[in-house]
Image (cartoon, rainbow, N blue to C red):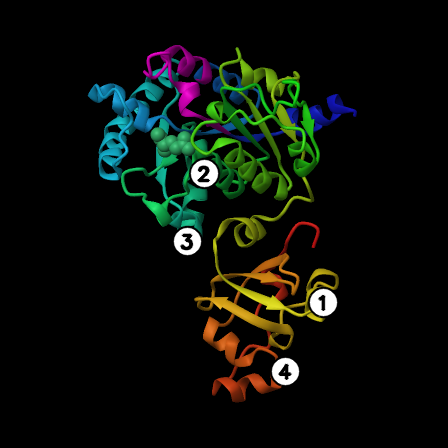
Amino acid sequence: MPSRPLRQDVIAQARRVVVKLGTQVLSDDVGQLDLALLRSVARQVVTLRQRGVEVTLVSSGAIGAGCAELGLDRRPTDVAEQQAVAAVGQRRLMDRMHEAFSRHGLNVGQLLLTRGDFDDRSRFLNIRNCLGHLHKLGCVPIINENDTVAVDELRVGDNDMLAALICNALPADALVLLTVVDGLLDESGERIDLVQDIDDAMRHVRADRSKWGTGGIQAKLDAVRLVTGAGEVAVIANGRERDVLTRLFDAEHLGTVFVPRGKRLSSRSRWIGLTKRAAGVVTVDAGAATALAKRGKSLLATGIVDVEGSFKPGDVVLVRDDAGRDIARGLTNYAHDEVAAIMGKRSNQYEKALGRPAFAEVVHRDNLVLAEGG
Ligand code: GLU
C-alpha cells in the first residue's frame, strides 16, 4: 500500500487541526497534571502555527486535576461530586495551560460545551464564530465538556466525540486523538500505519481496553468515523511520544492515520448529516429509497411507510429503507403527527389531510444529506 504519499497528502497538507488530549496523556505517574507534557504540547502548537497550521485543542483532565487539587485519592462516582470536582479541576487545568502557552506569548481561551450546543443551529454557529475569532486574536482555543452541568442526555459523553464535533464545526481538515497507545495495533501488537476501511481494519485490531481511556476504542472509532465521513483525515497517536504533533506533520510514520471516506461535505451538510441529533425516524419504501439515494430527489410523503419518534418542523429525521438501513438524514418540514397523517398520500392530498396549505416535500432535497454510500 503506498502509505507514504497518502500520509503526506492527508496530514502534511492540513491547515486546520483539532487535537484532543486525553486525561492519561496529561497526567503524570501520581495523577497530577504533567507540566512538562503541557509545555511540550504548547511548544509544538507554536511550531505548527509558525508553519501556518491552526490548532484547536480539546482537553480532558478536569476531573483528574480536581482530584489532585482537593487531595482526593479516587475519582468520585457520585455525579454531583464529580461536577464539583470538575469545577475546581477545570480552573486548575486552564491555569496550567495558560502557564504553558504564555511562555510563548500566547493567550488561551476556554470553551465549555454540552451536546445541546451542537444541536441548536444558532449556538452551533456561535461556537464556530467564537473559535474563528479566538484564532484571529492569536489565541489558542481549549475546549472541554461542561462537566459541571452535563448529565446523561446533555452530555456529548466523551471528549473524542466532542473533538470530532468541533472538527466538523470549524471545519478542520484533520482530527488528532492523542492517547497513551501508539495507534491501532494488530493481533501481533504491530501498529497499523494507515486505515482506508475502518470495518476491515477492526477485524485485525487488538483492543486493550485498559489503555483507551473514558470511552474505550469504540469511542475513538466513532469519532474517527464522524470525521472521515465528512471527508477529512483522522489520526490516533501516542501523546507521550516525543514531539508527536510536529513529527506527524512532517509525515513521519507515527500513529494510525485514517484516510477520508468520501468527498468533503459542506459545513451545512455536516451539521444536518453528522452533528444535530435525529429526533425521529421515517421509513420509506423501495421506490422512495432509490429516488433519494440514486436520483437526488426530495422525500415525499407518498413513499413513507412508517414514522417513529416525536419531532417538530426543523428537526432532523433519520430516513431508513424498509430493510432498516440508514439512507439519509434531513430537516423535516412536518411534525411527526403530520407525517403520520399524510404518509402514503400524494402531495395534492396533503392540504385536505392537514386542513391547511402544505409543503410538497416532507424533506426538501436541499435539506437532505445521504448516508455514506447512499
Ligand atoms: N471532560 C472530562 C474531564 O475533563 C473528560 C472526558 C473524556 O476524557 O472523555 O475530566
Q: Is residue 335 visible?
A: no
Is residue 59 shown left or right of residue 235? left
Q: Which is in the foreground here, disc 2 or disc 3?
A: 2
Please give the range of residues in magenta. 19-41
Mark 2 CB within 8 Å of ligand 1: yes
The residue carrying mark 4 is: 346
Q: CA distance from mark 1 to mark 2?
A: 34 Å
Q: Please tell me which residue is depicted at 40% across the width and 19% down the height of the picture.
A: 26
Q: Please tell me which residue is depicted at 21% across the width and 19% down the height of the picture.
A: 71
Q: Is disc 3 placed on a helix, strand or loop? A: helix
The mark nearer the N terminus, 1 or 2, is 2
Q: CA distance from mark 4 to mark 2?
A: 41 Å
The residue carrying mark 3 is: 122
Whether 176 is drawn above or below 253: the answer is below
Count neighbours of disc 2 (C-alpha within 10 A) and say few if under 14, some if 14 to 19, many if 20 or more.
Answer: many
The mark nearer the N terminus, 1 or 3, is 3
Whether 246 is drawn above or below 75: the answer is above
Amino acid at pointer 2: Leu
Say the numbered circle drawn on residue 193. none
